[in-house]
Every structure is written in C-alpha cells, then in structure tokens.
Amino acid sequence: MTFQAMYEWVNNTAASRFLQDSTLWFPVTEVFHLIGLTILIGAVFVVCLRLFGFGLMQPASQTYGGLWGWTWLGLALVLGSGIILFVAEPTKLATNEAFAYKLWFLAAGIALHIFGYVRFLKPGRIEASPVLARVVATLTLCCWFLAGVAGRAIGFV
Amino acid sequence: MPFMSFFQWLQETDMSVAIRESRLMFPLLEGTHVMALALSVGIIVVLDVRLVGWGLRSTPVSRIFENLRPWALFGFTIMFVTGILLFISEPIKCVTTPSFLIKLVLLAFAGLNALFFDRGVYPSIAGWDTSLAIPGRAKFAGAASLFLWFVIIFLGRWTAYA
C-alpha cells in the first residue's frame, strides 16, 4: 500500500467523512491541539529555564518531578487531537509542505523527549553532564516550538 | 456598534492596509501571536496548577511566582503587541464578531482575577507558602485563571474562523 493509497483510504473512512461534514468538530479539535501545545511548552520551558541557570532555584529534576504529569498530558492532548486533525483532511496534508516539516519536528521532539529529556531529568544526571543536559533541553524546546510554527503554517502555505 | 466610524477610519489607515494585504505580515503576526500564547499561557498554567494543588507541590508558591512571572510577562507582551496589530489589520471584522467581543470581556476578567490574587491573596503568602493546605481564595484564583485562559484560546480560534 503506497502512502497515497493510505491517505485516500483514511479520507474515505466514516470518521473522516464525519469530520469533513462537520463545521464544529474541526475547530474544536484545533483548540484542544493548541491547549495541549500550551501545556506541553509551559511545562518543558519551566524545566529548561533551570538548566540555563534561570527559573526555579531548585534542581531541574525536582521541577520535572512536579510537572511530569502535565508534560505527558500536553503531549497526549497534542497527539490525540493531531491524529483527529489528520483524519479530517489526509489528502490535503499529504501535499502540504509545512505539514511535512511539522512531522519531522514532531518525530525529533518525541525521540528527544523519550530518549533524552526524560532520562536526563532523573536526579543526578544533570550534575553528571551539565553541558549535554543543556544541549538536550535546547533541542527539545526548539523541536516543540518549531513543530508549533510549522503547524500554524499549514493553514498559510 | 458604537465608535464604528473610528474602526472604519482605523481599517483604512496605511498600517491596517499594509498588514492586511501583505502575504507575509499577517501569517507572521498570527504565528507569533499563537507561539507567544503557548509560552505565556503555558507558564501561567504552571503557576495555576501549583495554586490549585495539582503539581509542583514540593516547591514554595513564592519561588514559582517570583521566578516565573517575568517570563510569563515577556510572553504576554509579545502576545499583546501582536494581538493589537492583528486587530488593527481587520478592526471591523473583529468588533462585529461575537467571539471576539466575549474574548475581550474574558481577558478583562483574567486581568481582574490576576489583580485580585496579587492584592487580595498573595500578601498573606508567608502563612501558606510551603503548605499543601492552600487557602480557598488562592485555589479559586488558580482555577479561574485556568478556565478563563482555555476559554480565551477557544474564542481566539473562533474569531479567526469567523
């Protein structure tokens, strides 16, 4: 099955038809998408600030410990609503250049989050390699911001 | 709608026309507005979450507020300035769109809520800074802020769709 065939298959599902016919659910889902991004960026930004010497004057691992649930909630909201938004218009997104960029930032963001960010915020890890922790923090933050920018650009290109 | 002639005039100013007709300016402003929102409201959510007692419970409230407020204000300033410019680009559409007018009212409520917290609740912080027994008024301010900002995001998106 080629990608094109997959997009067309998604486009013909009952769920996609329902979303295409509704003028309400698409914008409502977009709102949840944006709220998810807001929660995710807020929680990640506050933790990353500390790694650069700003923010809450306590170990970054303690800050992450108090916010990890919100980080995952934000990510789950973004992904869940994002899948619904994709199902609503797969064939349009397939040829949208901004969407392609967004997917790369998203993939990089998730990989960094799971294999870098979460691991580095265990107590003691940052102190052991502070420079690498800053690199991971910068890249994670960049990925989420750029995913947001590319996502907003989908409607403009 | 009162002041309609003013909004008519505003819509015909060079600045309004320039933003509205530029293929680059409008998307740039709107994109910056949304990302500044993610930053400032994202930080506000962290503050509110602590007040309500849903996160960061091992961190004193004053530490969170004193350290994060400047960053929230920084994001808010960018959001505010880009918001004004977006309004200038299409004032007639904005003031005739119900979701925009409700959004303005809720923004005023969010401001009053922050003022109420700052003047009426925060001064007694020493008594409950590290306590998990947060006063009801502080919890209310946090919950109200969360609710207002999420509805404001909803109305902002609705205005763009109108």
Image (cartoon, rainbow, N blue to C red):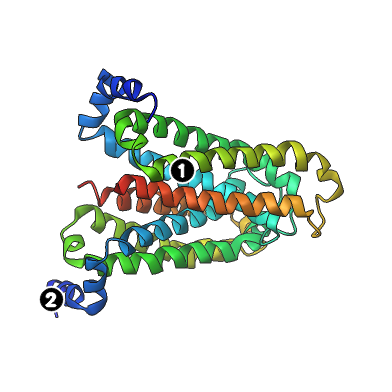
Which kind of residue does numbered mark 2 sit on? Ala
Farthest front residue in view = B1
Image location of residue B51, percent across then percent down:
70, 53
Q: Nearer the viewer, residue A114 or B70?
A: B70
Residue at point 68% right, 58% down?
A62
Image location of residue A67, percent across then percent down:
61, 60
Image height of B44 relative to A114, above or below: above
Kindly identify which chain the residue marked by label 2 belongs to. A
Q: Are marks 1 and 2 on the same chain?
A: no
Badge 2 element:
helix
Residue at point 16% right, 73% down?
A3
Q: Nearer the viewer, residue B5 or A148?
A: B5
Badge 1 element:
helix
- Marking on residue A5: 2
Quarter in which the N terminus of chain B is drawn: top left
Q: Nearer the viewer, residue A147 or B4?
A: B4
Kindly identify which chain the residue marked by label 1 belongs to. B
Which kind of residue does numbered mark 1 sit on? Lys
- Marking on residue B103: 1
Q: CA distance from mark 1 to mark 2?
A: 42 Å
Q: Residues within 10 Å of mark 1 (few under 14, many from 20)?
A: many
Q: Nearer the viewer, residue A31 or B162?
A: B162
Image location of residue B142, percent across then percent down:
66, 51
Residue at point 64% right, 49% down?
B47
Q: Residues within 10 Å of mark 2 (few under 14, many from 20)?
A: few
Image height of A108 relative to B76, above or below: below
